[in-house]
Amino acid sequence: MGEDSVRRLPQGERGRRRVALILEAAEQELAESGYEQFTTNAVAARAGISIGSIYQFFPNKEALVQALAARYHETIRKLYDDLFSGLPKGQPLARTVDYLIDPLVGYNARNRAFQALFCPILVPLRMSGAVAQVRSEVISRVHGIFADRRPDLPPESRSICVLISVHAVEALLPLATDGEGEVKQDVVREIKRLLLAYLEPILGNA
Amino acid sequence: MGEDSVRRLPQGERGRRRVALILEAAEQELAESGYEQFTTNAVAARAGISIGSIYQFFPNKEALVQALAARYHETIRKLYDDLFSGLPKGQPLARTVDYLIDPLVGYNARNRAFQALFCPILVPLRMSGAVAQVRSEVISRVHGIFADRRPDLPPESRSICVLISVHAVEALLPLATDGEGEVKQDVVREIKRLLLAYLEPILGNA
Amino acid sequence: MGEDSVRRLPQGERGRRRVALILEAAEQELAESGYEQFTTNAVAARAGISIGSIYQFFPNKEALVQALAARYHETIRKLYDDLFSGLPKGQPLARTVDYLIDPLVGYNARNRAFQALFCPILVPLRMSGAVAQVRSEVISRVHGIFADRRPDLPPESRSICVLISVHAVEALLPLATDGEGEVKQDVVREIKRLLLAYLEPILGNA
Amino acid sequence: MGEDSVRRLPQGERGRRRVALILEAAEQELAESGYEQFTTNAVAARAGISIGSIYQFFPNKEALVQALAARYHETIRKLYDDLFSGLPKGQPLARTVDYLIDPLVGYNARNRAFQALFCPILVPLRMSGAVAQVRSEVISRVHGIFADRRPDLPPESRSICVLISVHAVEALLPLATDGEGEVKQDVVREIKRLLLAYLEPILGNA
DNA sequence: GATGAATGAGGATTCATTCAT
DNA sequence: AATGAATGAATCCTCATTCAT
């Protein structure tokens, strides 16, 4: 990712906007029409540009998909950065769960192709790098939270607990959004309840 | 799904074996080579039969994928049938969770393409029917369990609770299996703990 | 050449005829329309078959061109085999020149794309193998003739002499054929005169 | 050729230098990367200018190739001009052959794309004009030499003789140069021997 | 004049599907 | 019923050419 995923690093403002336009179109295409309809021509048509312009910036279709994944990688990393760096200490667990879950729900509502792109059927083929990296980063940070709250917990049991928490949340978040990006607050509440019920016995409530 | 997913219900033993052979090959192809390599020719080659024979039984590729989904549908429905019909009443919740989760873990370990097929990137295209049906059946049965234990619960809150439970388990089961079909018992234990912690406050422990 | 230049060795009579049909069309396309118009679609259209059928037998365009070269390789090798194996000994040089040149003129008249395919602009790219091999075989056989006639000649001067003879004939043969495959006998006579004039001082006339 | 092969005859020194730069790059591209890689963008990149600048001077790719051919045309015409205008009369034939062949060998060694450009595979398409013209000029001048030496020869037999001579030399010259532009003197000697042996019986030795 | 991003027709190749054997 | 050669629409990608800056 990065060495030849972009043919020409767009240096002008124009180029940067063009790449963004293409990725935007790619994302919509993926979210609305699905992976079968995801052709370079469809992306170009949706972006309102010619097919050649896509190949000005991406050497091939694969690179376009990679770039999309990388962009998600970047934006979600940024979200996590902001979230974990501003994490309020000494709060009740319920407060911390609110603090983390709500923005993630928002991210999922805003980025509808995110889940689609990282689906397991594609992972073994090409996505593993990006997905694995995002996850391992999240996991290590959640690890940090757990370690803060319960430094005495043996690392192995902490690891499984983190794994389960992260995957459960990841899988349930799409349920909290309907097709049009609206958030279902009752589902969000229930996801938080699940997480709290699971974690309180381990991390306590303080 | 169903009206034209199979061209001719094969009545002879020979035909039934042939369909099974094709579906077996399709499943392996999907699990091992991924969705990009999943071509009708590849399936035929793996099955050791001619491409024409696939079209003897399936009108098109779509129908083949549908049939694969339907087969999962059928086998998991059978599992659920056995499971729910033999469900021991009046047991502690933890016992019931054991009773349900363990066979499901086993099913996931045995059917590696199952998760792949029902991945979100394909759902909007073709899978919704089969997936939705399987899920709705499971959900209604779990609903039944919940209703048995807490007939007083308002249906709406019960619905969300069931939804979350089913999706969480569905998403976490793959974590309990490594690449080769071996079951990680510590992960299984943790999944059960998650489910119990979430459900006990609602359904009680009896 | 040979390991993957043909996708499927056609075993049936039908397949063998089809490959021949394709190569025939490719040859005509090359001879009449030139290398720029030589597209797989043009070849298919000329052969009156679908584009897919070409790819049934040749994995790609390159392989088709290679196969064409290989076919020339084969036919001309066969011609040389027949020619050199039946070479009458103890004849006057002029008779030997007649014996060799006339069939070669005929071959050039019949195979109009032969020269085109082995043109220098393509050679560095892909043809070198086939061309070089055909030439080296011819050269070594002509070497043999020279050695028979003048065993006392130092090998190095013989080598240059053979080289010049072979290349000159190769280059001049196309002049003896007009566009429609008719042979210009006066040009043939002059080519023989050139060759004889050059070789007599070295090989003698016996 | 000529009417639209150059968009605008560059009148400034700057423009003339630019055209030369482009042709230089085109020649190198042809000689080093071959005809398949010969794209207008590749030529622009090698010349270190923008693709637009090529189209400032050449209306299309065809014209660029034509101009390259024309440049060879021009330089070789100049060589022939110098050569034939200074042709020493009344010399032995061997001297005349030396006088003509040596400079031609030099020209071939210096212009490596020359042969490539005039290869038969391209001729039917576009080259015929330039090639034919160069050849016909050479041929008419050689005709002149023959006429000087043997005014009594019937024109038709003279024509064939000239044709054969010119083509043979043209085809053999590349053999006298190795890949790096070095001249193989023994091959040059042999080419001259061939030519002399062929011509002496007709033109005499005086 | 120079630039190079943008265009899109065209070419190589794949693969779902048909049908003669 | 089984086969697999044949088909051709659809896809990815290239590259000659234009034109706004």
Image: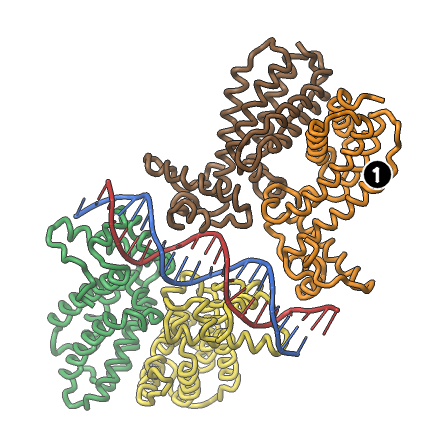
Chain colours: A brown, B orange, C yellow, D green, E blue, F red
Locate residue B78, reporting x and y percent.
81, 45
Where is residue D146, by image quadrant?
bottom left
Residue D110 visible within the image: no
Closer to the camera in the image, F9 or A51? F9
Left or right for B92, reference D27 = right
Locate residue D31, reporting x and y percent.
33, 58
Judging by the rendered image, the residue that carries numbered circle 1 is B83
- Structural crowding at the residue carrying mark 1, measured as other residues with C-alpha within 10 Å and reported as few (<14), some (14–19) or many (≥20): some
Residue at the image position 40 percent from the left and 78 percent from the top? C112
**Is E19 situated above or below D71?**
below
Residue B205 visible within the image: yes
Quarter of the image with the C terminus of chain C is bottom left
Closer to the camera in the image, B26 or A133? B26
Left or right for D105, reference A51 = left
**Is D38 situated above or below B194?**
below
Locate residue C25, reporting x and y percent.
46, 75
Left or right for B193, reference C24 = right
* Amino acid type at mark 1: Leu
Left or right for B40, reference D113 = right
Residue at the image position 76 percent from the left and 32 percent from the top? B184
Locate residue B117, reporting x and y percent.
66, 45
Closer to the camera in the image, B182 or D40? B182
Report in which chain the residue with disc 1 lies: B
Say how many tags the image has: 1
**Is E19 situated above or below A21?**
below
Residue at the image position 25 percent from the left and 86 percent from the top? D201
Residue at the image position 48 percent from the left and 88 percent from the top? C89
**SS class of the residue under badge 1?**
helix
